[in-house]
Amino acid sequence: MARRKAWPVGQCRVCLGWGEKPQYADCVACSSWRQLHPEQAPCRRCGHASHLNTDGLCRLCLQVIRTFDAEWIADPVAGRPCQLALILPGVRLPRSQPIDRPLKGRPRDASRPRSWLDRQRIASAEPSDDPRVCPPAVRGQLLLFRPRRQLAQEHVRRIRDRDLADYDRLQAIAIAQAAEQGFSKAWWRAACWMLRLALAVRDADGEDLVAEEVLDDLPRSQSAAADILREAGLLCPRLRRRPTIPPKPHRSCRHCDCWGFRSVCSGCSSWSTWPGRHPVGDCGRCGRRSVPLLNGICRACCLHIDQHGPDARKETWTQLWFGGDLAPRLAIRPGALGYDAPHHKARQRAAAARPPAPSISPHLVNPAQTALFDARRDWTCIVVGELDRLPSLTPVAEALLDDFRHHAKQRGWDEQVRRLAARSLRILLARLGADAPIHEADIRSLPADRPGTSARRILQFLTRRGLVVPDPARQVNIHQRAIDRRIQTFPEDIADELRSWVRVLRGEGRREHPAMPFETIRKYLGYLHPVLTAWADRVTSLREITKNDIRDALTQRPGSTGRDLLSALRSLFQALKQERLIFRDPTRGTSLSTSERLPVPIPTDRLRGLIDRAGTPMAKLVVALVAIHGLGRRETHCLLLADIDLARGRLTVRRDLPHTVYLDELTHVLASDWLRDRHQRWPLTANPYLLVSQQTVADDRLPPVSTMVMNDIFRPLGLTLSKLRQDRILDEARQTADPVHLMRVFGIAAETAMKYIYTAHPERRSVLWR
């Protein structure tokens, strides 16, 4: 029989334990502890310098806390002593993992058992019993009257640890009823909370049974609490009837026949209080008898004519409507329907005291006059409250302003937006006039800090009428301007080489090829900017860059950042080599190892209630289309209003191959809510897309919503659109192993479909992932 090897016996220099030391200096556990926690600092508990974990505790203190000093968690006092331990073969000490270690980067999973730290905190917590909530009274005391109480869910938490008689028996009955009727755990827990309130009120009244009137004050689950109390024999029958509020009778107005709650509506009542102006008689149009009249017709006829036009005067019938707040308002202008404006002396005095209208501005732009030199206008002199001092408008400018108001009303703009935009246009027309086109720079120079200044809407309106002189500085692509500004920050030689690289990518080099968008070139330049900035401090031209410089730059940027940088560097030096500006390409032969990224499922707790957490009806619909039907970002952007058919429950998705999405009940309801909200907010918009925003409905180009709008939808949810779509496709791949099914349902390529199939069913892959 082989003898067991004897290790040296001594004291571990980390935990000071006495026993065998296979590592000759430390015990086995402390040796791995030193490797995991190489830094040394004073321990929070004992104060000695040692290797500390994320809790700031050494390994010996952590074992002492888990063994017999758990009270230190509630009262963390420094300078506590430690009990030394023997290191014996086969005797395992408590594990030295951190006190509370949830999954890295994620909140604590509710399905996991509570951590040791939480259990210690709960055990040391003080019982909650607020004596101000339903204080118990002397049992058997005569109750003078039963007060009405305003009970809320918060009151249950404040008495959650109060010892209430008969509660355990009621809880057992609630659990039995839930199991018998198939209710969830949340049902009987909510019922037990209400039972605690009912028992607390019973003790506050000093009675043995719970009066049925008490259940009227519970915030919820009154019927469930009544059934449980009745089965337990603790419910006292109601002694007085439940107060009932008689409903107001519905009737029609005696004068205009509108449907409401009053015999005479508020509008007709105000008419009847003016007997001199509205004498009582028979209407000469509809024939109503003994009603207040205005020029021989009643108020119902006046309202009908005001709503349907002057031609309705020849008719003998009136349109009925609802009364109260839903009733239309009758605002008769002077001269309409024979209505004469009342002589208000205050208005006459105000009109007499009003200063005369200002003269027309002498600085109106004359289209026949040439400009000596260009100068931009400064509108800061027009401050808030000085609009009345603006010059008067010319007839042409007044007509243009009225046309703008009509245009804004047809587009369905908000009333405040229309008013503020018209005010900005009036500032321009009062100073510059409407006879000559206005420079775009003058329109955009309106003070941006002024509330309601809307240059974009004014520009679109005036451009359609040929009254705008475009600004040459704004005709350049926004990404092109950003590229030019960034290139100007480099030395002259390097900047010239970068401009040659941009010309090559735009297809203007020695060899013809398709032009690359400025947006992509701007991304490449963003990857290159920090590297080129570092190189510009020591080189004067990119000819001096070697392979070692490329390798050092890639070493400092591992992962996906390095791959993006390598792609940009290859594009730069290949273009310079093509233009014969450098002798050799330093990126030739340089490569980075790539690892295939597999789709990762999203935890269930992050998906629970995802649609309910979305803020607006449009956000709820977008989340449902991505999380349920797996639509991509571009597909969701390009959905048209004509693509959705609520009557048949279908949604047409525009792909290379036509695809039809059959809406489930939830998505159908969310789509209906969004269409209703879209029509209420922008009833006259001509934007053809299903998803619109405040900016796209006011843009004459009728664009789809931007990427920023989509990101704002998913940012509060803590997810991205692509991650949510990947989780949906991966979930479908778990249900089926057919890649063709994934290609048809989600419109993905064959290679992508196989990647999801292999991720969901790794046993089907013959080659392991790298």
Image (tube, grey):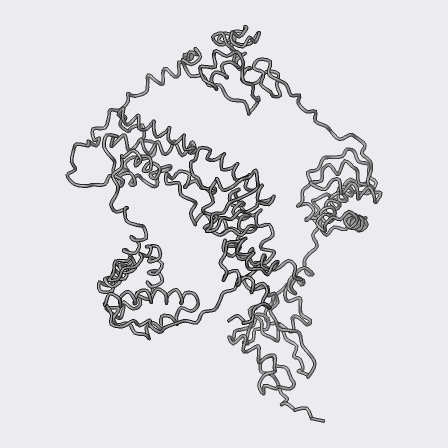
Q: Residue at x 79, y 38 (%)?
A: 211
Give the camera-side residue of 238 and 623: 623
**In the figure, is residue 256 to the left or right of 336?**
right
Residue 408: quadrant of the picture: top left
Give the camera-side residue of 511 and 545: 511
User: Can you give x and y, in whole percent of width and height, for residue 720 in the image?
Assistant: 50, 54
Evaluate whether residue 165 shows in this view.
no
Give the camera-side residue of 704 and 4: 704
User: Can you give x and y, in whole percent of width and height, for residue 239 in the image?
Assistant: 81, 32
Residue 133: quadrant of the picture: top right
Evaluate whether residue 429 shows in this view.
yes
**In the figure, is residue 697 to the left or right of 488?**
right
User: Can you give x and y, in whole percent of width and height, for residue 224 in the image?
Assistant: 76, 42
Image vertical order of residue 301 relative to residue 693, above or below? above
Image vertical order of residue 2 relative to residue 612, above or below? below
Q: Residue at x 26, y 62 (%)?
A: 511
How many numbered marks are there? 0
Image vertical order of residue 393 relative to residue 88, above or below? above
